[in-house]
Image (tube, grey):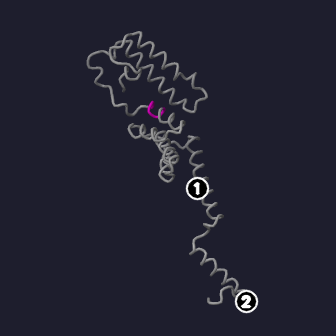
Amino acid sequence: MKDPYEVLGLQRGASKEEVKSAYRRLAKKYHPDMNVNNPLQDLAEEKFKEIQRAYDEIMSGKADSPGYGSTYTNNNTGSTADLYSARSYINAGRFQEAMNILRRTNVRNAEWNFLMGVCHVSMGSINQGLQYIQTAVNMDPSNFEYQNYLNQIYNMQHLYQQRAYNYGGGPSSADCCAQLICADCLCECLGGDLISCC
């Protein structure tokens, strides 16, 4: 559990008015009604719940009771807010910043793998990204977003292979020789000779 003051972006000892103001500002930003059409709706809802818990703990005095603060983690790892932030960076095209956040969080769920995969693919490491995306799909096979992105990567790879074949990459020289030998055998069976030395 994170320190409630940290969740609200406040220093310990903040006044009740500061707590209320921070709560209102963050609750308005992450409230489910404000994120209805947001693809990050689930993460926003988790953040909203975290903000509510933090506010309740501070206002009830629990957050300031002796010994209670020792249960807090102050290293900012493992929160869904990290995943929300990483996704925001990805949407802004800031993949390195997103990867920095993902690397320092302890969360290793399907969403984490998906976001890490998107970063790698977007930065050109398609094979490495593909492994993360596949892990995300395996962890949450019913997630349409993950499956759709995986299919897009496979389609993209197939398209590149097809273009390479059509624009001169073609089959390897070994495949080409094998095809010529097969063609020669067929011709000889029909009474012709494609390659006179064989």
- The answer to which of 101 and 55 lies nearer the viewer is 101
Counting the numbered discs, the total is 2
- Which of the 4 image quadrants contains residue 146? top right
Image position, residue 29 (x, y; %): 52, 22
- Decide: is 28 above or below 131: above
**Disc 2 residue type?**
Gly
For residue 192, side relative to residue 31 (left or right)? right
Q: Is residue 73 left or right of residue 85?
A: left
Disc 1 is placed on an element classified as helix
Foreground of the two, 134 or 127 = 127
The residue carrying pointer 1 sits among few (fewer than 14), some (14 to 19) or many (20 or more) residues within 10 Å by Cα, namely: some
Residue at x 38% of width, y 16% of height: 57
Give x and y (percent) for residue 90.
51, 38
Q: Identify the element where label 2 is drawn.
A: loop
Classify the position of the N terminus by image quarter. top left
> Residue 27 location in percent, x, y?
50, 19
Image quadrant holding the C terminus, namely: bottom right
Q: Mark 1 vs mark 2: give the one in front.
A: 1
Q: Residue at x 48, y 27 (%)?
A: 46
Compared to residue 111, the image places residue 158 above or below, namely below
Q: Magenta residues?
A: 80-84
Residue at 32%, 14% (x, y): give it. 13
Residue to which mark 2 is pinned = 191
Instruction: Pinpoint residue 43: horizontal percent, then vertical percent.
Output: 50, 30
Most frequent secondary structure within the magenta stretch: helix
* Left or right: 187 in relation to 198: right
Distance from the alpha carbon under mark 1 to that under mark 2: 42 Å
Res 104 → quadrant: top left
Q: Amino acid at mark 1?
A: Gln
Residue wearing tag 1: 157
